[in-house]
Image (cartoon, grey):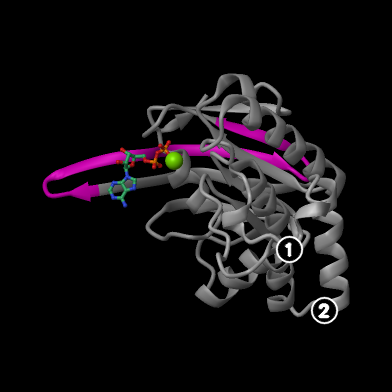
Amino acid sequence: MSKIVEISDLRREFVQGDVTIEVLRGINLSVGDGELVALLGPSGSGKSTLLQAIGLLEGGFEGSIRLDNEEVSASSVDRQTEIRREKLGFVYQFHHLLPDFDALENVVLPQLIADAAPDQAEDRAKHLLGKLGLAERLHHRPAKLSGGEQQRVAVARALANRPKLVLADEPTGNLDEHTADIVLGEFMELVRGEGSAAIVATHNERLAAKMDRVFRLHEGVLT
Ligand code: ADP
Ligand code: MG
């Protein structure tokens, strides 16, 4: 299987005054194309820091990050931006939808930014939102949607540009348990249907167990 992510000896430390915290202490991780994995660890264990490294959202890391068979850790800012746009999708704990745009527009806009034709972008947005049960909510703004619906729109947006890899940081962490289960199940089904890979950070053992593999983050290394 070809690898979408290969990380070796990734390290990150934060210095605060005269205290140095080693948050990631030599992470080795590989994820195959189309694989769905969980990143499990308690709050403060470094899950978000690791996803920020893989998502090329932060600097300051040591070690190697290969995305889709390209060494990207030392790539130019422009190349990293291009990789983020072309290959990655993001879902966060809070949806970060644009409040003045409706559900459909929130999923269409990133496609237009990536130069998709407007008709095709709209068809794709409707397809994704329909799969997530939001066919009747296309013209609702985020404030008029429930928490679960808002996260579904965020999921559709993350998949809009057909990313090879979706990075999801506690995507259901803001939802009640029942809704979290449903939304995560829908997310996984959609990601599989699209053939994307995903790394889902969570501190929920039960949700993690639904993925293909579970990586546990403990004292800055994966077990
Ligand atoms: P998680 O997502 O698993 O809750 P984080 O990756 O957010 O963990 O944080 C891991 C550790 O790194 C925590 O101890 C946190 O305080 C520290 N940390 C994260 N970001 C910073 C930062 N920008 N400056 C200093 N310390 C940070
Ligand atoms: Mg976090």
Label 2 SS: helix
Q: Main secondary structure of the magenta part?
A: strand
Q: Are marks 2 and 1 in contact (CB under 8 Å)?
A: no
Instruction: Return the x and y of residue 2 as percentages of the image width and height.
Output: 79, 46
Which is more toward the observer, 186 or 20?
A: 186
In this rendering, the answer to whether 190 lies above or below 40 is below
Q: Quadrant of the N terminus?
A: top right
Left or right: where 120 falls relative to 165: right
The residue sitting at 88% across, 66% down in the picture is 123
User: Is 148 above or below relative to 178?
Assistant: below
Instruction: Give me the residue at 74% from left, 71% from top.
Output: 111
The reply, left or right, for residue 192 in relation to residue 113 is: right
> Where is residue 110, by image quadrant?
bottom right
Q: Earlier in the sequence, mark 2 or mark 1?
A: 2
Q: Which residues are magenta?
A: 15-39
Write down the residue under mark 2: 118
Q: Position of residue 130 (x, y in %)?
A: 84, 51
SS category of the residue bearing label 1: loop
Q: Which residue bears the numbered disc 1?
A: 139
In the image, 120 versus 100, the foreground residue is 100
Which amino acid is tagged 2? Answer: Pro
Quarter of the figure with residue 81: bottom right
Question: In percent of the image, x 81 and y 53: which residue is there?
Answer: 136
Answer with left or right where residue 14 lies relative to residue 43: left
Q: Given the image, on which type of amino acid does mark 1 rest?
A: His
Residue 83: where, in percent of width, then height?
A: 64, 66
